[in-house]
Image: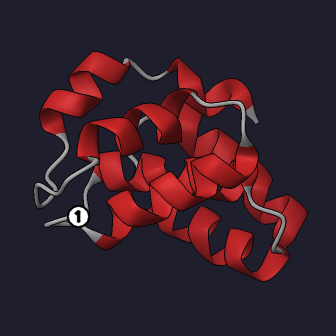
Amino acid sequence: MNAFRIAPVVVLLASVQAVAYDGFETDFSTCTQSNDSGAVVAACSRLIDNAAAENSVVGMLYGLRAANNTDAAQNCFDAKKSLALEEDDAIKSLSQQLIDQNC
């Protein structure tokens, strides 16, 4: 679901609260812009695992992972996390669609 990719990446990169690690910028770019679903899931997972705090940016990462993963149970969990953390109504709507499809 590419609709999650409409979020302004530059603003998100500046506001992401994650522990710096080698590959952070590459993971962020892959998670938010790649068309390779497997790479998106892996990159978003690393970003989520390294997040210093859960916030709306991390909510978007959960949504991106859910939109690109093939595991319905994981997608259900991720979409619910995205819905709970996200503040943007458009992304909340997409998260709800993912919940409806996977839960």
- Which is more toward the observer, 71 or 37? 37
In the image, taking residue 16 as reference, residue 95 lies left or right, namely right
**With respect to residue 101, does 95 lie above or below?**
above
> Residue at 56% of width from left, 45% of height from top?
92
| x then y, percent, for residue 98 | 76, 55
**With respect to residue 65, does 24 lie above or below?**
above
Give, as a three-letter code, the residue at label 1: Ala
> Residue at 71% of width from left, 30% of height from top?
35
| x then y, percent, for residue 59 | 41, 54
| SS state under label 1 | loop
- Residue ID for mark 1: 51
In the image, taking residue 81 as reference, residue 22 lies left or right, namely left
Local crowd size for mark 1, using a 10 Å CA cut-off: few (<14), some (14–19), many (≥20): some
Could you say which quadrant of the image residue 52 lies in?
bottom left
Question: Which image quadrant: the N terminus?
Answer: top right
Q: For residue 21, say whether it is visible.
A: yes
**With respect to residue 81, does 55 lie above or below?**
above
> Residue at 34% of width from left, 58% of height from top?
47
> Residue at 69% of width from left, 77% of height from top?
74
**With respect to residue 13, does 101 lie above or below?**
below
Q: For residue 96, say whether it is visible.
A: no
Question: Which image quadrant: the C terminus?
Answer: bottom right
